[in-house]
Image (cartoon, grey):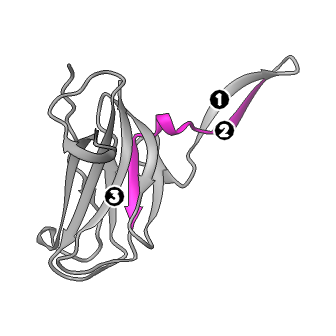
Amino acid sequence: MRQIRTAAALLALAGFTAQAASLELGLYQPVNLNGTVTLRKAASTLPGQILRQVAVATTDKALKSPRATIPVPQHTTYAGKLELPKGAAATFSLDGKTFSARPMKTVTVTENGHTVTKQVPAAESEYRAVRVTLPQLQPNTPYTVAYDIKVN
Protein backbone atom coordinates (compact mmCIF):
# COMPACT_ATOMS: atom_id res chain seq x y z
CA MET A 1 0.00 0.00 0.00
CA ARG A 2 1.41 3.40 -0.95
CA GLN A 3 0.30 6.75 0.39
CA ILE A 4 0.09 9.43 -2.28
CA ARG A 5 0.49 13.04 -1.22
CA THR A 6 -0.91 15.73 -3.45
CA ALA A 7 1.42 18.70 -3.63
CA ALA A 8 -0.07 22.12 -3.00
CA ALA A 9 -1.42 23.60 -6.20
CA LEU A 10 -0.26 27.01 -7.23
CA LEU A 11 -2.71 29.66 -8.26
CA ALA A 12 -1.23 32.15 -10.67
CA LEU A 13 -4.08 34.60 -10.69
CA ALA A 14 -3.01 38.11 -11.64
CA GLY A 15 -4.10 41.07 -9.60
CA PHE A 16 -5.74 39.55 -6.53
CA THR A 17 -4.86 38.63 -2.99
CA ALA A 18 -4.43 35.05 -1.80
CA GLN A 19 -7.78 35.28 0.01
CA ALA A 20 -9.65 35.92 -3.26
CA ALA A 21 -9.37 32.37 -4.62
CA SER A 22 -8.71 28.85 -3.41
CA LEU A 23 -7.94 25.55 -5.07
CA GLU A 24 -8.73 22.30 -3.27
CA LEU A 25 -7.22 19.02 -4.49
CA GLY A 26 -8.47 15.51 -3.82
CA LEU A 27 -7.69 11.98 -4.96
CA TYR A 28 -10.66 9.73 -5.62
CA GLN A 29 -11.17 6.10 -6.49
CA PRO A 30 -13.84 5.26 -9.10
CA VAL A 31 -16.29 2.75 -7.57
CA ASN A 32 -18.97 0.89 -9.52
CA LEU A 33 -22.20 0.69 -7.52
CA ASN A 34 -25.04 -1.11 -9.29
CA GLY A 35 -23.76 -0.08 -12.71
CA THR A 36 -23.16 3.55 -11.75
CA VAL A 37 -19.61 4.80 -11.32
CA THR A 38 -19.13 7.18 -8.41
CA LEU A 39 -16.02 8.66 -6.83
CA ARG A 40 -14.93 7.81 -3.29
CA LYS A 41 -12.08 9.59 -1.47
CA ALA A 42 -8.97 7.39 -1.79
CA ALA A 43 -7.86 6.27 1.66
CA SER A 44 -5.04 4.05 0.38
CA THR A 45 -3.59 3.10 -2.98
CA LEU A 46 -1.96 0.17 -4.71
CA PRO A 47 0.50 0.13 -7.65
CA GLY A 48 -1.36 0.05 -10.96
CA GLN A 49 -4.51 1.57 -9.47
CA ILE A 50 -6.23 4.34 -11.47
CA LEU A 51 -7.36 7.33 -9.41
CA ARG A 52 -9.13 10.55 -10.30
CA GLN A 53 -7.38 13.77 -9.28
CA VAL A 54 -9.98 16.49 -8.78
CA ALA A 55 -9.25 20.20 -8.30
CA VAL A 56 -12.02 22.62 -7.36
CA ALA A 57 -11.39 26.36 -7.65
CA THR A 58 -13.59 28.96 -5.96
CA THR A 59 -13.33 32.70 -5.43
CA ASP A 60 -15.03 35.39 -3.40
CA LYS A 61 -14.71 37.97 -6.22
CA ALA A 62 -14.87 37.80 -10.01
CA LEU A 63 -11.54 37.06 -11.73
CA LYS A 64 -10.68 37.27 -15.42
CA SER A 65 -8.37 34.68 -17.00
CA PRO A 66 -7.28 32.93 -13.79
CA ARG A 67 -4.71 30.17 -14.14
CA ALA A 68 -4.03 27.19 -11.87
CA THR A 69 -1.10 24.80 -12.02
CA ILE A 70 -1.98 21.33 -10.75
CA PRO A 71 0.95 18.96 -10.19
CA VAL A 72 0.71 15.26 -10.98
CA PRO A 73 1.29 13.70 -7.53
CA GLN A 74 4.62 12.06 -6.77
CA HIS A 75 4.66 8.29 -7.40
CA THR A 76 1.90 8.58 -10.02
CA THR A 77 1.64 8.98 -13.79
CA TYR A 78 -0.78 11.22 -15.70
CA ALA A 79 -3.34 8.91 -17.34
CA GLY A 80 -5.53 11.32 -19.33
CA LYS A 81 -9.31 11.72 -19.38
CA LEU A 82 -9.00 15.45 -18.69
CA GLU A 83 -12.29 17.21 -17.86
CA LEU A 84 -12.38 21.01 -17.91
CA PRO A 85 -15.04 23.64 -17.22
CA LYS A 86 -16.63 25.15 -20.32
CA GLY A 87 -14.30 27.61 -22.03
CA ALA A 88 -11.19 26.46 -20.13
CA ALA A 89 -7.92 25.52 -21.82
CA ALA A 90 -5.14 23.24 -20.58
CA THR A 91 -1.41 23.01 -21.17
CA PHE A 92 0.99 20.39 -19.85
CA SER A 93 4.52 20.29 -18.50
CA LEU A 94 7.30 17.72 -18.31
CA ASP A 95 9.19 19.69 -15.65
CA GLY A 96 6.55 21.80 -13.88
CA LYS A 97 8.03 25.01 -15.34
CA THR A 98 7.55 25.03 -19.13
CA PHE A 99 4.01 24.46 -20.42
CA SER A 100 2.67 23.59 -23.86
CA ALA A 101 -0.48 22.14 -25.39
CA ARG A 102 1.73 19.30 -26.64
CA PRO A 103 5.07 19.13 -24.78
CA MET A 104 8.06 18.05 -26.82
CA LYS A 105 11.18 16.22 -25.71
CA THR A 106 14.58 15.73 -27.28
CA VAL A 107 15.55 12.20 -28.30
CA THR A 108 18.57 10.75 -30.04
CA VAL A 109 17.85 7.97 -32.54
CA THR A 110 19.64 6.16 -35.34
CA GLU A 111 18.14 6.76 -38.79
CA ASN A 112 19.73 5.26 -41.90
CA GLY A 113 22.91 4.53 -39.96
CA HIS A 114 23.26 8.10 -38.63
CA THR A 115 22.68 9.38 -35.12
CA VAL A 116 20.01 12.08 -35.19
CA THR A 117 18.78 14.30 -32.36
CA LYS A 118 15.24 15.56 -32.79
CA GLN A 119 12.18 16.86 -31.00
CA VAL A 120 9.24 14.47 -30.60
CA PRO A 121 5.94 14.76 -28.71
CA ALA A 122 6.25 13.46 -25.16
CA ALA A 123 3.96 10.66 -24.03
CA GLU A 124 1.10 11.75 -21.74
CA SER A 125 2.59 9.48 -19.07
CA GLU A 126 5.55 11.88 -18.88
CA TYR A 127 3.42 14.91 -17.94
CA ARG A 128 4.26 16.22 -14.45
CA ALA A 129 1.78 19.12 -14.23
CA VAL A 130 -1.40 20.46 -15.81
CA ARG A 131 -1.99 24.22 -16.12
CA VAL A 132 -5.59 25.30 -16.59
CA THR A 133 -6.67 28.76 -17.74
CA LEU A 134 -10.30 29.72 -17.29
CA PRO A 135 -11.97 32.60 -19.10
CA GLN A 136 -13.22 33.85 -15.72
CA LEU A 137 -14.19 32.82 -12.20
CA GLN A 138 -17.51 33.99 -10.83
CA PRO A 139 -17.87 34.51 -7.06
CA ASN A 140 -19.00 31.53 -4.98
CA THR A 141 -19.15 29.23 -8.02
CA PRO A 142 -17.05 26.03 -7.99
CA TYR A 143 -15.02 25.25 -11.12
CA THR A 144 -13.86 21.63 -11.35
CA VAL A 145 -10.91 20.15 -13.23
CA ALA A 146 -10.33 16.40 -13.15
CA TYR A 147 -8.00 13.86 -14.72
CA ASP A 148 -6.89 10.29 -14.16
CA ILE A 149 -3.59 9.25 -12.64
CA LYS A 150 -2.04 5.81 -12.30
CA VAL A 151 -0.21 4.81 -9.12
CA ASN A 152 3.37 3.71 -9.89
Amino acid type of the residue tagged 1 in the rendering: Val
Seen as rendered, the residue at the extreme left is: 19
Magenta segment's dominant SS is strand
Seen as rendered, the residue at the extreme right is: 112
Relative horizontal placement of residue 66, taking residue 115 as reference (left or right): left
The image shows residue 107 at horizontal and vertical percentages of 65, 29
Q: Residue at x 22, y 75 (%)?
A: 141
Q: For this rendering, which residue is in front, 110 or 25?
A: 25
Residue on which disc 2 sits: 120
- Which segment did they paint magenta? 115-133
- The image quadrant of residue 7 is top left
Q: Is residue 89 above or below residue 99?
A: below
Amino acid type of the residue tagged 3 in the rendering: Val
Residue on which disc 3 sits: 145
Seen as rendered, the residue at the extreme top is: 113
Q: Residue at x 29, y 32 (%)?
A: 74
Question: SS class of the residue under badge 2?
Answer: strand
Amino acid type of the residue tagged 2 in the rendering: Val
Seen as rendered, the residue at the extreme front is: 34
Q: Mark 2, residues whose alpha carbon is within 10 Å: few (<14), some, or many (≥20)?
A: few
Residue on which disc 1 sits: 107
Which of the two discs, 3 and 1, sits closer to the camera? Answer: 3
The answer to whether residue 96 is seen in the rendering is no
Q: Is residue 129 magenta?
A: yes
Q: Quadrant of the N terminus?
A: top left
Q: Tell me whether circle 3 and circle 2 mark residues in contact (CB < 8 Å).
A: no
Which of the two discs, 3 and 2, sits closer to the camera? Answer: 3
- The image quadrant of residue 111 is top right
Q: Tell me whether circle 1 and circle 2 mark residues in contact (CB < 8 Å).
A: yes
Q: Quadrant of the C terminus?
A: top left
